[in-house]
Image (cartoon, rainbow, N blue to C red):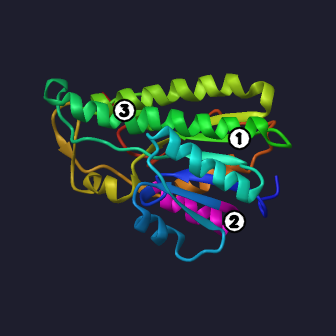
Amino acid sequence: MSTDTQTIIITGAGSGVGRATAHRFLAAGWRVGLVGRREQALVETADGHPNARVMACDVSDEADVDRVFAAAAADWGRLDALFNNAGVTVKGKPINEVSVADWRSLIDINVTGAFICARAAFGLMREQTPQGGRIINNGSVSAHVPRWGSVAYTTSKHAVTGLTRSISLDGRPFSIACSQIDIGNALTDMAQSMTTGMPQADGRIEIEPVMDVKHVADSVLNMAQLPLGVNVQFMTVMATNMPYIGRG
């Protein structure tokens, strides 16, 4: 695939992994749709780049998502890729201290939002000519093993894995590839607490190794640049010495 005219929508593009990935794709010559709830944050991500398209949108709102995805695809002529990255978390606590309202709010973004965006992208990719495209879901190492006090977040990321597998099957007749990147301890604003101390499974508070978020952005770009006949089904990118293998 040549990247000089490729197009991608990145959700959660106003900060963290989404912003870093958007910058990496723009640097590689892609046209990038920046999706998020905070328009000013998206404008800051775009930083005036001519190939960046600011698309303020609530990923949990079906009509909002359909509107901005369709507008971008109509303007570009096609949608080649979606990085389904938007996600939130809640403060770590045992399950009985997690409010139902916080659970529903998180699931609405991390699961329902991912479904709505994937659904919109899939529909565009199925109908365009030439047919096909790629959907990359942001899982987490929590899609495999939980942290202490993370029942809502861990459940959401296990659900993302089911979404990835199902889209992979649904996409086969239409040249739509779907994959998942599972990230461990990328240093973003959300991960700053890892540098000061995180609760461990045995109750200790420990500082954890982190990695530069640019390695995540590079990995997503590498996955997206593959021809549609090739897929990285699951990729784990993590700080080498973080407590993941053996966690729990």
In the image, residue 27 lies in the stretch drawn in magenta:
yes
Q: Residue placed farthest to the bottom in the image?
A: 48
Residue at the outermost right position:
130
Amino acid type for the residue under numbered disc 3 = Ile
The crowd level at tag 1 (other Cα within 10 Å; few <14, some 14-19, many 20+) is many
The magenta stretch spans which residues? 17-31
Distance between the Cα atoms at labels 1 and 2?
A: 23 Å
| Badge 3 element | helix
Q: Give SS at disc 2.
A: loop
Which label is found at residue 28?
Answer: 2
Task: Mark 2 or mark 3: name the one nearer the start of the chain.
Answer: 2
Which residue is rendered at x = 73% and y = 40% of the image? 125
Of the numbered discs 1 and 2, the one sitting upstream in the chain is 2
Q: Real-space Cα distance between discs 2 and 3? A: 33 Å
Residue 93: horizontal and vertical position, in percent? 17, 34
Residue labelled with disc 1: 124
Q: Residue at x 66, y 34 (%)?
A: 178
**Quadrant of the drawing holding the C terminus:** top left
